[in-house]
């Protein structure tokens, strides 16, 4: 989210490279030598801006800004037809969630009535038992197409959101590539002095947008569904015992805070796992693209050692994250 919101450093470097090329061209045409200085200052300024943005893109506040920014980009900047369709889908999804929440409490009440009917008078009132069973099965039968409609609407909403954001970011990246034509490969950002892999934003945009949309919709709608269930069940418990409903609300809030405290390191562990996986994938790509040179210099042992080290790091981060999650 933070990378998408604050801008990929590769894009900023490509823009600075284009400014350098343009200024050098102006130098050639005008016969002056002041443009390279301006180009250097502009490049330094853009790179400093990129570093400042990366420093701001850390922590929960940055993730929240990223979520709000990308959401506004879709709900405000998408074509009108897409926004209308998405709004209708979202409204229907929320309506289905309310219906499912109400149906859940109804099924719970029916089960309770069924148990009470079976326990009273030794279960001799077979007509009441059969009537309650038919109501219960009928509700499940009605909810079956409702659940199908819910997932269909949700998939349609995700597809529209993903298509819009992917098209936007790919268009921006392709435009930047075209501007830097002749200045070398612009799909790779320069690596650092510590041997970190080069970034390939053009190969990650579609996948990252898809993951973002899936997580954003899942987390937000699951939170809303939990609040709906909490409301209906609290209302049901309040009709039985008001003090019990207050205890349930307090327990739900306490459980949420406890889960938040126990899982506060999970985002960092997820990020470390993705970082290690990216390093390992880069090692495989590097060996495939430079196989001839590696074979010529007999560098297979060194490459295997480097790949083994990154594989161990990937497995270690995954193990740490799963251990913390469990």
Image (spheres, helix red, strand yellow):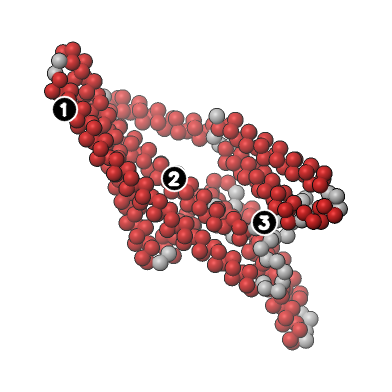
Q: Which residue is mark 2?
A: 218
Q: Which residue is mark 1?
A: 131
- Taking depth in this image into account, of 207 and 57 the one nearest to the observer is 207
Q: Residue at x 26, y 31 (%)?
A: 107
Residue 96: percent from left, percent from top: 30, 45
- Mark 1 and mark 2 residues within 8 Å of each other at the beta carbon: no
Instruction: Give whichever of discs 3 and 1 has the lower sequence position.
Output: 1
Residue 218: percent from left, percent from top: 44, 45
Q: Residue at x 18, y 12 (%)?
A: 122
The answer to whether residue 61 is above or below residue 253 is below
Q: Which mark is residue 65?
A: none
Left or right? Give the position of 180 relative to 303: left
**Secondary structure beneath disc 2?**
helix
Instruction: Give whichever of discs 1 and 2 has the lower sequence position.
Output: 1
Instruction: Give whichever of discs 3 and 2 has the lower sequence position.
Output: 3
**Secondary structure beneath disc 3?**
loop
Q: Residue at x 45, y 33 (%)?
A: 256
- Mark 3 and mark 2 residues within 8 Å of each other at the beta carbon: no
Which corner quadrant of the image does residue 171 belong to? Answer: bottom right
Name the mark nearer the viewer: 3 or 1.
1
**Secondary structure beneath disc 1?**
helix
Real-space Cα separation, disc 1 to disc 2, in angstroms: 37 Å
Which corner quadrant of the image does residue 320 belong to? Answer: top right
Residue 235: tell me if it is visible: no
Residue 36: tell me if it is visible: yes
Real-space Cα separation, disc 3 to disc 2, in angstroms: 28 Å
- Taking depth in this image into account, of 135 and 76 the one nearest to the observer is 135
Q: Which residue is mark 3?
A: 199
């Amino acid at each position: 989210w933070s990378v998408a919101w604050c801008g990929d450093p590769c894009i900023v470097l490509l823009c600075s490279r284009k400014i350098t090329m343009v200024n050098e061209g102006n130098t050639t045409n005008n016969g002056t030598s002041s443009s390279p200085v301006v180009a250097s200052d502009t490049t330094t300024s853009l790179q400093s801006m990129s570093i400042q943005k990366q420093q701001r893109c850390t922590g929960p506040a940055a993730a929240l800004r990223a979520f709000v920014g990308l959401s506004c980009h879709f709900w405000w900047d998408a074509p009108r037809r897409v926004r209308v369709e998405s709004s209708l889908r979202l409204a229907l999804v929320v309506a289905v969630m309310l219906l499912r929440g109400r149906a859940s409490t109804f099924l719970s009440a029916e089960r309770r009535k069924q148990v009470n009917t079976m326990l009273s008078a030794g279960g001799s009132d077979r007509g009441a038992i059969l009537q309650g069973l038919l109501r219960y099965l009928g509700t499940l039968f009605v909810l079956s197409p409702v659940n199908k409609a819910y997932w269909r609407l949700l998939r349609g909403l995700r597809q529209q959101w993903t298509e819009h954001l992917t098209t936007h970011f790919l268009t921006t990246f392709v435009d930047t590539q075209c501007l830097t034509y002749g200045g070398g490969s612009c799909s790779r950002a320069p690596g650092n002095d510590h041997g970190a892999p080069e970034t390939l934003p053009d190969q990650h945009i579609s996948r990252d947008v898809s993951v973002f949309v899936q997580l954003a919709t899942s987390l937000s709608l699951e939170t809303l569904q939990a609040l709906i269930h909490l409301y209906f069940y609290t209302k049901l418990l309040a009709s039985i015992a008001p003090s019990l409903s207050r205890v349930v609300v307090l327990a739900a809030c306490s459980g949420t805070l406890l889960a938040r405290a126990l899982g506060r390191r999970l985002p960092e562990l997820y990020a470390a796992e993705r970082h290690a996986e990216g390093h390992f994938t880069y090692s495989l790509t590097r060996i495939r693209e430079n196989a001839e040179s590696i074979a010529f210099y007999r560098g297979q042992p060194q490459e295997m050692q480097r790949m083994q080290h990154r594989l161990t790091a990937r497995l270690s981060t995954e193990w740490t994250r799963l251990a913390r999650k469990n």
